[in-house]
Amino acid sequence: MTMTTLATSLLTLVELPYAYDALEPYVSAETMHFHHDKHYATYVAKLGELIADTRYQQMPLEDIIRSSDGAIFNNAAQVWNHVFLFESLSPRAKHHPTGELRRSIDEEFGSFDELKQRMTTMALSLFGSGWVWLASDHDGRLYIVSKSNAGTPLTDSLIPLLCIDVWEHAYYIDYRNMRKDAIDNLWKVIDWSKVEERYDAIW
Ligand code: MN
């Protein structure tokens, strides 16, 4: 089973799959430079330092995430989460899911709008820093999962399909304290063809 289409070499810095200004006006080039080159790159560098000469050094990133805690877990999960986030966005985003994923969304949540509303509400009510995830179990049943800090549904044996970064660093440059505006606009660059690809890879 293919877990995801995530880039394979995750212990080194993964470049953005589009230009820094590609998601404007919804996410600015300045935000992307800080988010990718500073925040994400720091997690990569820190993880490298932490796992040097340990049993984690030769482990796939997902195995590190499932078997560590503390600083190693935090940095490993933040590396994974950010590559996954950046790959979820596109300047040529498909704005609505179709096919099997759409059927499952309608069945579980009633409608695509309802799914977006619920994820937005969870992102707005998440206290502090964290992530809101759309994830699937191995039978294709969908779940919305809210996680603090570096949390990921990988540790719940769920398959991540989509994430919203609710850390202030993801939106504060562009939106200041207006988290709702940031999330409303993020939906405009979430590429549902990528989410469908991840869902279809479960089988
Ligand atoms: Mn982030």
Image: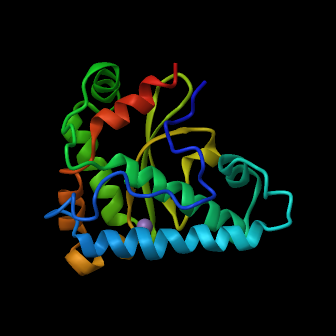
- The way the protein has been coloured in the rendering is rainbow
Residue 131 in the image, given as x and y percentages of width and height: 44, 59
Numbered disc total: 0
Instruction: Name the residue nearer the viewer: 35 or 114.
Output: 35
Residue 196 found in image quarter: top left
The quarter of the image that holds ligand 1 is bottom left
Residue 46 location (% of width, % of height):
64, 74
Q: Is residue 97 above or below residue 30?
A: above
- Residue 20 falls left or right of residue 137: left
Identify which residue is drawn at 67% across, 68% down: 47
Residue 133 % position (x, y): 43, 49
Give the quarter of the image for residue 170.
bottom left
Residue at 66% across / 51% down in the picture?
61
Q: Residue furthest left?
A: 25
Q: Is residue 146 visible?
A: no
Taking depth in this image into account, of 133 and 21 the one nearest to the observer is 21
Tell me what residue is drawn at x 71 percent, y 50 percent: 66
Quarter location, residue 183 = bottom left
Say left or right for 180 vs 131: left
Q: Is residue 113 left or right of residue 201?
A: left
Quadrant containing the N terminus is top right
Image position of 75 (left or right of 30): right
The residue that appears at 36% across and 47% down in the rendered structure is: 88
Q: Give percent across and percent down for residue 76.
A: 63, 61
Of 136 and 39, which appears nearest the observer?
Answer: 39
User: Can you say whether 114 is above or below 176 in the image?
Assistant: above
Q: Is residue 93 visible?
A: yes
